[in-house]
Image (tube, grey):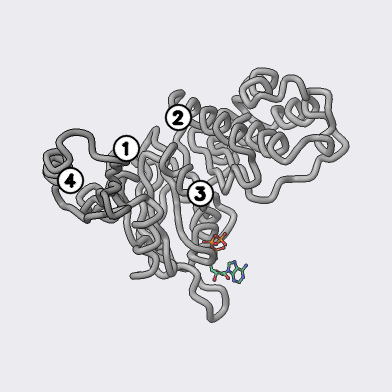
Amino acid sequence: MPNAVIRARGLAKRYGDAVALRSVDLDVQHGEIFSLLGPNGAGKTTTTEIMEGFRTRDAGELSVLGEDPARAGAAWRGRIGIVLQQAKDFADISVADVVHHFAVYYPNPRDPDEVIDAVGLTEKRASRAAQLSGGQRRRLDVALGILGNPELLFLDEPTTGFDPEVRRRFWELIAELRSSGTTILLTTHYLDEVEYLADRVGVVNGGTVVDVSTPDHLGGRHLAPSTVRWVGPDGPQEQVSSNPTRTVGELARHFGGDVPELTVTRPSLEDVYLQMIGES
Ligand SMILES: Nc1ncnc2c1ncn2[C@@H]1O[C@H](COP(=O)(O)OP(=O)(O)OP(=O)(O)O)[C@@H](O)[C@H]1O
């Protein structure tokens, strides 16, 4: 693929006798948010850490921003941003000092004050990291991840522990980063996060990628039959239909107008994901 920022073929990794990655193939395109989904132990962290150059692979081909992470140097590292699951510890340093301090390590950093503002921490500039709430702490991690103006940002479970409002604002921040041209590899367990943010999603299970699709089309979801529900004289009713328009038309004629408490649903992303994980 010409626009691939990440191209992986046959990535394999063992820890002793345990196979963590059997064979991972993946393409991430320039400017997209690509989400990795999969159960605990599926191989997501191993995959991303090989892509970040933090772990070695046993086999396979890998190109990230045109280089092999196993051999890439400091200039390449300056082009990627990483937000790990486990935050670093700067308990006694203020938000402003942490961000200003780390900016000097990058050849082409963003303005530290603009970054603090972008993640919504301006009011907390003078607070020590230890005084931040969990969600604010995570936003500081993201500030550090985007500080170097990365072309490619790795986000590992970024919103764990966020309240709904903070999550929504955080999602908007991530979507803005995409608009400004940053490619993002997002690992998450939250299907609503995938639905809101991801352009494409790769499902990892048992050390391999079992499907890649848009969230809308995962597992043939857009073609799946719908469930039509309504309440009739005998109580709640439902009918699975491959042509819900026709079913609703028939019901409307039957009721001579409005169908009581009518809903039409397709399988949710969670439904197809759980089925896929079960099958594979
Ligand atoms: N350092 C390690 N030493 C030994 N085994 C490991 C090591 N790191 C990971 N594994 C094993 O490799 C497999 C894949 O782990 P990995 O952390 O990549 O999964 P994951 O999809 O990121 O899981 P989670 O959703 O729980 O973060 C698991 O079976 C795990 O136990």
The numbered disc on residue 178 is 2
Task: In this rendered view, identify the residue nearer to me: 239 or 44.
Answer: 239
CA–CA distance between discs 1 and 3? Answer: 27 Å
Helix, strand or loop status at disc 1: loop
- Residue 136 lies, with reference to residue 154, above or below; the image says above
Count neighbours of disc 1 (C-alpha within 10 A) and say few if under 14, some if 14 to 19, many if 20 or more.
few
In this figure, which residue is indicated by the disc labeled 1?
3
Q: Earlier in the sequence, mark 2 or mark 1?
A: 1
CA–CA distance between discs 3 and 2? Answer: 19 Å
| Amino acid identity at mark 2 | Arg
The numbered disc on residue 190 is 3
In this figure, which residue is indicated by the disc labeled 4?
244
Helix, strand or loop status at disc 2: helix
In the picture, residue 167 is in which quadrant? Answer: top right
Q: Which numbered mark, 1 or 3, is in the foreground of this view?
A: 3
- Residue 82 lies, with reference to residue 275, above or below; the image says above
Helix, strand or loop status at disc 3: loop
Helix, strand or loop status at disc 4: helix
Q: Quadrant of the C terminus?
A: bottom left
Q: Which numbered mark, 3 or 2, is in the foreground of this view?
A: 3
| Amino acid identity at mark 1 | Asn
Q: Is residue 73 left or right of residue 90?
A: left
Q: Are marks 1 and 4 in contact (CB under 8 Å)?
A: no
| Amino acid identity at mark 4 | Pro
Count neighbours of disc 2 (C-alpha within 10 A) and say few if under 14, some if 14 to 19, many if 20 or more.
many
